[in-house]
Amino acid sequence: MDLSKGFNVQLATLFGIGKIPGGGTWASLFVLIIALYEQSAETASFIAFLSLIIGPNAYRKLTALFDSEDPKEYVLDEVIGMGIAISGVYIFTRIFDQFSFDFIESISAVGELFILTFIFFRFFDISKIGPVGWIENNQQEKAYIRVVGDDIMAAILSIIVVIFFLSVNLYVMQ
């Protein structure tokens, strides 16, 4: 086996996470756990950026082994999307300091935001609602753009919804 091909397949599946049932959720959870541990989005942002760079080659190597343009084993798209979602929410809350949640005492305010972001990201990614589905079903785009694009759109929608909830929370609490 070509070492390069094997390593790229390992990256594409996030070292086997994509091969287990619900691999996309587990890959997103991997990014969430890193962000919760650090209480910031720095590493999550770095991982998402790195995945954007290595993603196309890893995707190509993995799809050569499958009969699908979007094999469920490819989970770097979820890593990219979740990293973008967490980064967007984190940046917004750092710029506008008064925006936060503090409902559960045992979890930090930033942790609550990350968990909420994870929930919305998975909702949009799984349901393929609205623009997420449009991007995934746009046959005029290349397969890799559709595979990663729907997760980026799910991330953007997650950021918007979490910021909306933060805004409503701030308005109601004042």
Image (cartoon, rainbow, N blue to C red):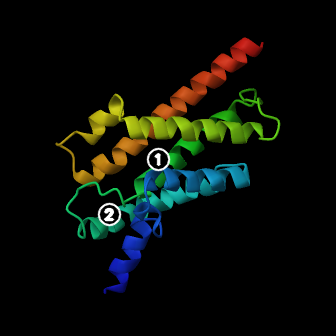
Query: Looking at the picture, does residue 54 appear above or below residue 155?
Result: below
Helix, strand or loop for disc 1: helix
Image coordinates for residue 78, horizontal then vertical, percent: 45, 51
- Name the residue rendered at 61%, 23% in the picture: 165
- Name the residue rendered at 38%, 35% in the picture: 127
Q: Identity of the amino acid at label 1?
A: Gly
Image coordinates for residue 65, horizontal then vertical, percent: 25, 70
Q: Quadrant of the C terminus?
A: top right
Label located before the other in sequence (2 or 1): 2
Helix, strand or loop for disc 2: helix
Tell whether 99 sits left or right of 3: right
Query: Looking at the picture, does residue 172 appear above or below residue 153?
Result: above
Count of numbered labels shown in the rendering: 2
Mark 1, other Cα within 10 Å: few <14 / some 14–19 / many ≥20: many
**Residue 59 numbered tag:** 2
Label 2 – label 1 distance at C-alpha: 15 Å
Is residue 98 visible in the rendered image? The answer is yes
Query: Looking at the picture, does residue 8 appear above or below residue 148?
Result: below
Residue that badge 1 annotates: 81
Q: Quadrant of residue 93?
A: top right
**Residue 151 numbered tag:** none
For this orientation, the residue located farthest to the front is 21
For this orientation, the residue located farthest to the right is 105
Image coordinates for residue 28, horizontal then vertical, percent: 52, 51
- Name the residue rendered at 43%, 35% in the picture: 124
